[in-house]
Amino acid sequence: MGYEGRPPPPPAQIGLRNFAPEAGSFFDEVTSLRYPFQVLYSADDYLANLATQSGTHALGEVGSAEFLARVRHRLESLGWPQLTATFVGYLTVGRRT
């Protein structure tokens, strides 16, 4: 079983997001801010969160179960009772023209 895609880059390498080009005619003075943050998860909480994500659902019922079992096994084999996940939140605002 494989999982398509690549891991995201580190937060420092993620650039700003902007409005879609087609929205540009509706807004002036567009600005975007990044807010990197980290969440400490227990292995069980991490797996519960992972189970809700669309990429996991896209694997189908059997694929999702196998994927989550493999992640659980990997976490247990590494002895990680907790892990830190890094996220980047965005705030993009603009003044309507």
Image (cartoon, grey):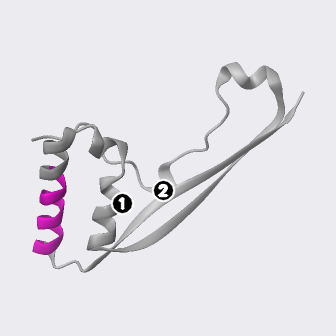
* Residue placed most toward the observer, 52 or 11: 52
Q: Position of residue 21 (x, y in %)?
A: 66, 22
Q: Which residue is mark 2?
A: 11
Q: Position of residue 22 (x, y in %)?
A: 68, 19
Q: Earlier in the sequence, mark 2 or mark 1?
A: 2
* Residue 6 visible in image: no
Q: Position of residue 74 (x, y in %)?
A: 13, 65
Magenta span includes 74 = yes
Query: Few, some or many C-alpha atoms within 10 Å of disc 2 (few <14, some 14-19, many ≥20)?
Result: some
Q: Quadrant of residue 5?
A: top left
Q: Look at label 2 and name its amino acid.
A: Pro
Q: Position of residue 33 (x, y in %)?
A: 68, 51
Left of 29 or right of it: where is 77?
A: left
Q: Quadrant of residue 36?
A: bottom right
Q: Which residue is mark 1?
A: 49
Q: Secondary structure at mark 2?
A: helix
